[in-house]
Amino acid sequence: MVAITKYKYAKRIGVSKMTVTRRTATNVLLDTALKNFYGAAEEMGLDENLIAILGSSERRLEVSVPVEMDDGSIRIFRGYRVQHSTAIGPAKGGIRYHPEVDVDECEALAMLMTWKCSLAGIPYGGGKGGICCDPLTMSMKEKERMSRAFAARIAPIIGTWQDVPAPDVNTGGQEMVWFVDTISKLRGHLEPGVFTGKPIPYWGSMGRTAATGYGVATCGLELLRVLDKDPKNATVAIQGFGNVGSYTALTMVEAGAKVVAISDVTGTYYAPKGIDIKKAFEHISTHPKKLLEGFTCDGCEKKNLDDILFVECDILYPCALDGVINVKNAGDVKAKYIVEGANGPVTPDADEILTKKGVLIVPDFLANSGGVIGSYFEWAQNLSGYFWTEEEYNKRLIHIMKGNFKLVWDYSQNSSVPMRRAAFMAAIQRVADVVKLRGVFL
Ligand code: NAD
């Protein structure tokens, strides 16, 4: 449920007797997204009409998704697609299969995608969608029928130049193939650019697997560079050794840094003289569940799961879950800098504590934007029908990530605000500028 409240803020930003419509929501995620937006917009002194436009989503679509189950019964699932903004370009954002998916959650995530794409400097707006279902209890055939029915239902509002969804929780390459195939059949021609995150043999892109981790590591290296620190003297701890964490670790080691601790669900692996990261990567590559379980190296000591967060180091990369650094443990963090690989690993309360302690934080929607930049690369290749090499992909990715880091760093220095607030402000500014240029029509 979304409530509308009137909020007087004219005095605060020094304009005449105007009021701006502010939305609040009972959904915590949406309420937080709105508060973050209004807070940053006010601090920037953004025009109240622009605040009203960007505080609302362009479209919230709800569809029914009828599926014939394997036992012959018919079940109706609820599906959603929200387009928060298409001011800059087609909406972009994942499709999630989860029992807790609802339209407000989709809207919150769609809004975050608008800012993420804007900050990344790629020509997209923000969207998000999903189906309220429990995919873990469904057969492949049931999931295929559900995916195809959903794609057909949202077909009128998606397209290469309209809205380009991608994988999210519980969806991946297989679902993207079903989606593209369904849309292409409906339209009577192949449309590979309508979804990204496809497998390499079916219009996917080389380089995507490592993209997020490369980007996360690049932000850490850029931070060291602007602080005039040599990566060869830097020590690093990485929570989570999955897709994002492992490629972050490999990139940091390549740059000469010493990774002193890594962790996954099986615990923390700590070696003050440095961990052999290539060996750890080979270990997870051959482990049946891709875990560090049983990993050893010279001088390596096994510690408790959460000990990774309290390791003495220069950079801590939380690359596992949201909310891991919170009000209860933020005071014990010893890292000088935190670069957020996961989405939302530092809670707002913890952020305040850490900022007061002088810990510099590179926010998630800057640090882990390599994933969405990779989606943009896949789309660009699909549009031209010409595939890049992995080297071309990585070179372009690193170039963009460095530019984006600089944008946020400079904004933060010039406006004397922490990097998270600076990232929001820079992102909102770019969208607002385009809305102003285009004027109000739709
Ligand atoms: P993944 O499943 O490949 O890896 C997650 C890792 O975290 C695993 O090693 C797992 O064992 C570990 N882990 C889980 N719980 C833990 C705990 N309590 N303590 C320590 N380690 C724990 O996932 P991923 O793709 O690497 O994503 C990690 C995070 O990054 C998520 O928040 C995700 O939303 C975010 N993210 C990922 C991408 C991407 O492209 N993969 C892009 C943007 C953001």
Image (cartoon, rainbow, N blue to C red):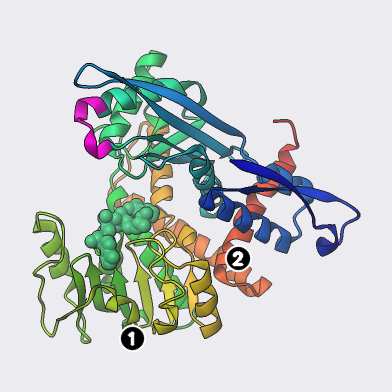
Quarter of the picture holding the C terminus? top right
Q: What residue do we see at 43% from left, 30% from top?
A: 79
Q: What residue do we see at 44% from left, 55% from top?
A: 369
| Left or right of 69 on screen, residue 49 | right
Quarter of the picture holding the N terminus? top right
Q: Secondary structure at mark 2?
A: helix
**First to last magenta residue range:** 135-142
In the rendered view, would you say 107 is above or below 274? above
Q: Position of residue 257 (x, y in %)?
A: 30, 78
Instruction: Answer with the quarter of the image where residue 54 lies.
Output: top right
Nearer to me, 373 or 266:
266
Residue tagged 2: 422
Residue tagged 1: 312
Badge 1 amino acid: Glu
Instruction: Answer with the quarter of the image where residue 182 lies.
Output: top left
Instruction: Answer with the quarter of the image where residue 40 lies.
Output: bottom right
In the rendered view, would you say 399 is above or below 177? below
Badge 2 amino acid: Ala
Nearer to me, 353 or 434:
353
* First in sequence: mark 2 vs mark 1: 1
